[in-house]
Image: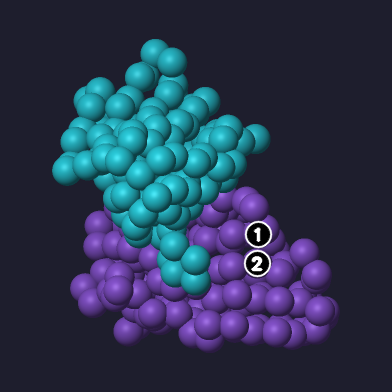
Amino acid sequence: DSGVTQTPKHLITATGQRVTLRCSPRSGDLSVYWYQQSLDQGLQFLIQYYNGEERAKGNILERFSAQQFPDLHSELNLSSLELGDSALYFCASNRQGASYEQYFGPGTRLTVT
Amino acid sequence: DQQVKQNSPSLSVQEGRISILNCDYTNSMFDYFLWYKKYPAEGPTFLISISSIKDKNEDGRFTVFLNKSAKHLSLHIVPSQPGDSAVYFCAASGKIQGAQKLVFGQGTRLTINP
Protein backbone atom coordinates (compact mmCIF):
# COMPACT_ATOMS: atom_id res chain seq x y z
CA ASP A 1 0.00 0.00 0.00
CA SER A 2 1.63 3.23 -1.21
CA GLY A 3 -0.50 5.48 0.98
CA VAL A 4 -1.96 7.23 -2.07
CA THR A 5 -5.71 6.77 -2.47
CA GLN A 6 -7.83 7.26 -5.55
CA THR A 7 -11.58 7.23 -6.00
CA PRO A 8 -13.54 5.85 -7.68
CA LYS A 9 -11.87 2.58 -8.70
CA HIS A 10 -14.02 2.22 -11.79
CA LEU A 11 -16.13 4.70 -13.72
CA ILE A 12 -18.36 4.02 -16.73
CA THR A 13 -19.91 6.97 -18.49
CA ALA A 14 -21.17 8.07 -21.90
CA THR A 15 -19.57 10.25 -24.53
CA GLY A 16 -20.05 13.95 -23.97
CA GLN A 17 -20.27 13.61 -20.19
CA ARG A 18 -18.02 15.07 -17.49
CA VAL A 19 -16.36 13.18 -14.63
CA THR A 20 -14.18 14.01 -11.65
CA LEU A 21 -11.41 11.75 -10.38
CA ARG A 22 -10.11 12.23 -6.87
CA CYS A 23 -6.69 11.63 -5.34
CA SER A 24 -5.38 11.90 -1.78
CA PRO A 25 -1.58 11.96 -1.57
CA ARG A 26 0.55 10.25 1.06
CA SER A 27 0.62 12.01 4.39
CA GLY A 28 3.18 14.82 4.21
CA ASP A 29 3.50 14.81 0.42
CA LEU A 30 3.05 18.22 -1.18
CA SER A 31 3.28 17.23 -4.82
CA VAL A 32 0.64 15.42 -6.86
CA TYR A 33 1.04 14.10 -10.39
CA TRP A 34 -1.61 12.79 -12.79
CA TYR A 35 -0.91 10.20 -15.49
CA GLN A 36 -2.98 8.52 -18.18
CA GLN A 37 -2.33 4.95 -19.31
CA SER A 38 -4.19 3.91 -22.46
CA LEU A 39 -4.25 0.31 -23.70
CA ASP A 40 -0.71 -1.08 -24.13
CA GLN A 41 0.80 2.35 -23.67
CA GLY A 42 3.19 3.70 -21.08
CA LEU A 43 2.14 6.25 -18.53
CA GLN A 44 1.63 9.65 -20.12
CA PHE A 45 2.24 12.58 -17.78
CA LEU A 46 -0.69 14.98 -17.65
CA ILE A 47 -0.08 17.57 -14.95
CA GLN A 48 1.68 18.24 -11.63
CA TYR A 49 0.64 20.34 -8.65
CA TYR A 50 2.89 21.38 -5.80
CA ASN A 51 1.36 22.74 -2.60
CA GLY A 52 -1.73 23.97 -4.41
CA GLU A 53 -0.06 25.47 -7.45
CA GLU A 54 0.38 24.08 -10.93
CA ARG A 55 4.05 23.13 -11.35
CA ALA A 56 4.30 21.33 -14.71
CA LYS A 57 2.10 20.37 -17.62
CA GLY A 58 2.38 17.44 -19.96
CA ASN A 59 0.16 16.28 -22.79
CA ILE A 60 -3.05 17.34 -21.11
CA LEU A 61 -6.01 18.08 -23.37
CA GLU A 62 -7.86 21.37 -23.03
CA ARG A 63 -10.99 19.37 -22.09
CA PHE A 64 -9.12 18.18 -18.99
CA SER A 65 -8.33 20.28 -15.94
CA ALA A 66 -7.06 19.67 -12.43
CA GLN A 67 -6.64 21.40 -9.12
CA GLN A 68 -5.07 20.79 -5.73
CA PHE A 69 -6.96 21.89 -2.66
CA PRO A 70 -5.65 23.36 0.64
CA ASP A 71 -5.82 19.91 2.26
CA LEU A 72 -3.55 18.75 -0.62
CA HIS A 73 -6.01 16.35 -2.22
CA SER A 74 -6.35 16.75 -5.96
CA GLU A 75 -9.11 16.36 -8.52
CA LEU A 76 -8.83 15.70 -12.24
CA ASN A 77 -11.82 16.87 -14.26
CA LEU A 78 -12.48 15.35 -17.66
CA SER A 79 -15.20 16.92 -19.79
CA SER A 80 -16.82 16.36 -23.20
CA LEU A 81 -15.63 12.79 -22.93
CA GLU A 82 -14.73 10.83 -26.04
CA LEU A 83 -14.28 7.09 -26.57
CA GLY A 84 -10.52 7.63 -26.76
CA ASP A 85 -10.46 8.96 -23.20
CA SER A 86 -11.07 5.44 -21.92
CA ALA A 87 -7.94 4.63 -19.92
CA LEU A 88 -6.43 4.09 -16.51
CA TYR A 89 -5.77 7.34 -14.69
CA PHE A 90 -3.09 7.25 -12.01
CA CYS A 91 -2.26 9.77 -9.38
CA ALA A 92 1.18 9.84 -7.74
CA SER A 93 2.72 11.92 -4.98
CA ASN A 94 6.05 12.77 -3.40
CA ARG A 95 7.45 15.26 -0.91
CA GLN A 96 10.01 17.25 -2.78
CA GLY A 97 8.23 17.66 -6.10
CA ALA A 98 11.47 17.04 -7.97
CA SER A 99 9.94 14.22 -10.00
CA TYR A 100 12.19 11.50 -8.63
CA GLU A 101 10.63 8.56 -6.79
CA GLN A 102 6.89 8.94 -7.00
CA TYR A 103 4.35 6.87 -5.09
CA PHE A 104 1.37 5.77 -7.13
CA GLY A 105 -2.24 5.17 -6.23
CA PRO A 106 -4.16 2.13 -7.51
CA GLY A 107 -5.68 4.08 -10.39
CA THR A 108 -9.16 4.84 -11.69
CA ARG A 109 -10.32 2.88 -14.72
CA LEU A 110 -12.49 5.10 -16.90
CA THR A 111 -14.64 3.55 -19.60
CA VAL A 112 -16.43 5.86 -22.02
CA THR A 113 -19.22 4.19 -24.00
CA ASP B 1 8.18 11.55 -29.88
CA GLN B 2 8.98 8.55 -27.69
CA GLN B 3 11.88 9.72 -25.54
CA VAL B 4 12.01 6.50 -23.50
CA LYS B 5 11.62 3.16 -25.26
CA GLN B 6 11.26 -0.37 -24.08
CA ASN B 7 11.46 -2.37 -27.28
CA SER B 8 10.44 -5.72 -25.83
CA PRO B 9 6.74 -5.82 -24.96
CA SER B 10 7.22 -9.17 -23.22
CA LEU B 11 9.88 -11.47 -21.81
CA SER B 12 9.66 -15.03 -20.52
CA VAL B 13 12.34 -16.42 -18.17
CA GLN B 14 12.81 -19.66 -16.28
CA GLU B 15 12.66 -19.44 -12.48
CA GLY B 16 16.15 -19.14 -11.00
CA ARG B 17 17.67 -17.68 -14.16
CA ILE B 18 18.59 -14.06 -14.85
CA SER B 19 15.98 -11.62 -16.23
CA ILE B 20 17.34 -8.69 -18.22
CA LEU B 21 15.01 -5.85 -19.12
CA ASN B 22 16.23 -3.14 -21.46
CA CYS B 23 15.42 0.51 -21.98
CA ASP B 24 16.73 3.16 -24.39
CA TYR B 25 16.36 6.92 -24.18
CA THR B 26 17.03 9.79 -26.55
CA ASN B 27 17.24 12.90 -24.37
CA SER B 28 20.75 13.47 -23.01
CA MET B 29 19.31 15.92 -20.44
CA PHE B 30 17.81 13.09 -18.38
CA ASP B 31 19.66 13.00 -15.05
CA TYR B 32 17.93 10.25 -13.10
CA PHE B 33 16.50 6.89 -14.10
CA LEU B 34 14.03 4.64 -12.33
CA TRP B 35 12.40 1.25 -12.68
CA TYR B 36 8.85 0.61 -11.58
CA LYS B 37 7.02 -2.68 -11.25
CA LYS B 38 3.29 -3.03 -11.80
CA TYR B 39 0.95 -5.86 -10.87
CA PRO B 40 -2.56 -6.05 -12.39
CA ALA B 41 -5.15 -3.79 -10.72
CA GLU B 42 -2.44 -1.95 -8.78
CA GLY B 43 -0.46 1.22 -9.34
CA PRO B 44 3.23 1.09 -10.29
CA THR B 45 5.61 0.65 -7.36
CA PHE B 46 9.13 2.04 -7.26
CA LEU B 47 11.80 -0.64 -7.54
CA ILE B 48 15.27 0.86 -8.02
CA SER B 49 16.90 4.00 -9.41
CA ILE B 50 20.21 5.33 -10.65
CA SER B 51 21.68 8.77 -11.00
CA SER B 52 23.27 9.74 -14.30
CA ILE B 53 26.64 10.11 -12.55
CA LYS B 54 26.74 6.39 -11.76
CA ASP B 55 26.86 3.33 -13.99
CA LYS B 56 25.56 0.70 -11.60
CA ASN B 57 23.25 0.46 -8.61
CA GLU B 58 22.47 -2.74 -6.78
CA ASP B 59 19.71 -3.61 -4.33
CA GLY B 60 19.44 -7.25 -3.39
CA ARG B 61 18.44 -9.28 -6.43
CA PHE B 62 17.99 -6.14 -8.55
CA THR B 63 20.77 -4.29 -10.34
CA VAL B 64 20.39 -1.38 -12.72
CA PHE B 65 23.13 -0.60 -15.24
CA LEU B 66 23.44 2.72 -17.06
CA ASN B 67 25.44 3.21 -20.27
CA LYS B 68 25.29 6.94 -20.93
CA SER B 69 27.23 6.87 -24.17
CA ALA B 70 24.73 4.37 -25.60
CA LYS B 71 21.77 6.04 -23.84
CA HIS B 72 20.79 2.63 -22.56
CA LEU B 73 19.85 1.19 -19.22
CA SER B 74 19.01 -2.29 -18.11
CA LEU B 75 17.52 -4.01 -15.10
CA HIS B 76 18.93 -7.37 -14.05
CA ILE B 77 16.98 -9.62 -11.72
CA VAL B 78 18.85 -12.62 -10.39
CA PRO B 79 17.70 -15.14 -9.46
CA SER B 80 14.24 -14.61 -10.97
CA GLN B 81 11.30 -15.69 -8.84
CA PRO B 82 7.61 -16.31 -9.73
CA GLY B 83 6.63 -13.20 -7.75
CA ASP B 84 8.69 -11.11 -10.16
CA SER B 85 6.08 -11.71 -12.87
CA ALA B 86 4.73 -8.21 -13.57
CA VAL B 87 4.97 -5.32 -16.00
CA TYR B 88 8.19 -3.32 -15.61
CA PHE B 89 8.36 0.33 -16.59
CA CYS B 90 11.55 2.23 -17.11
CA ALA B 91 11.34 6.00 -16.43
CA ALA B 92 13.69 8.92 -16.92
CA SER B 93 13.66 12.25 -15.12
CA GLY B 94 14.82 15.51 -16.62
CA LYS B 95 13.96 19.11 -17.34
CA ILE B 96 11.55 19.18 -20.27
CA GLN B 97 9.94 22.40 -21.44
CA GLY B 98 11.20 24.20 -18.34
CA ALA B 99 9.95 21.73 -15.73
CA GLN B 100 11.28 18.54 -14.16
CA LYS B 101 9.25 15.61 -15.52
CA LEU B 102 9.23 11.84 -15.43
CA VAL B 103 8.94 10.13 -18.82
CA PHE B 104 7.92 6.48 -18.91
CA GLY B 105 8.56 3.71 -21.41
CA GLN B 106 5.73 1.50 -22.66
CA GLY B 107 6.55 -1.33 -20.27
CA THR B 108 7.78 -4.92 -20.58
CA ARG B 109 5.66 -7.80 -19.31
CA LEU B 110 7.94 -10.25 -17.51
CA THR B 111 6.73 -13.82 -16.96
CA ILE B 112 8.73 -16.14 -14.74
CA ASN B 113 8.06 -19.79 -15.52
CA PRO B 114 8.41 -22.41 -12.77
Chain in purple, by letter, is A
Relative image position of residue B49 (x, y in whole percent): 28, 41
Displayed quadrant of residue B61: top left
Q: Which residue is mark 1?
A: A38
At 30% from the left edge and 27% from the top edge, which residue is drawn? B65
Displayed quadrant of residue A21: bottom right
Which residue type carries mark 1?
Answer: Ser
Q: Quadrant of the N terminus of chain B?
A: top right
At 80% from the left edge and 84% from the top edge, which residue is drawn? A14
Determine whether, in the image, residue A79 is placed left or right of residue A53: right
In this picture, is A21 found above or below A33? below
Mark 2 neighbour density, 10 Å: few (under 14) some (14–19) many (20 or more): some
Relative image position of residue A99 (x, y in whole percent): 35, 51
- In this view, the residue in front, A96 or B77, is B77
Q: Which residue is mark 2?
A: A87
At 43% from the left edge and 15% from the top edge, which residue is drawn? B70
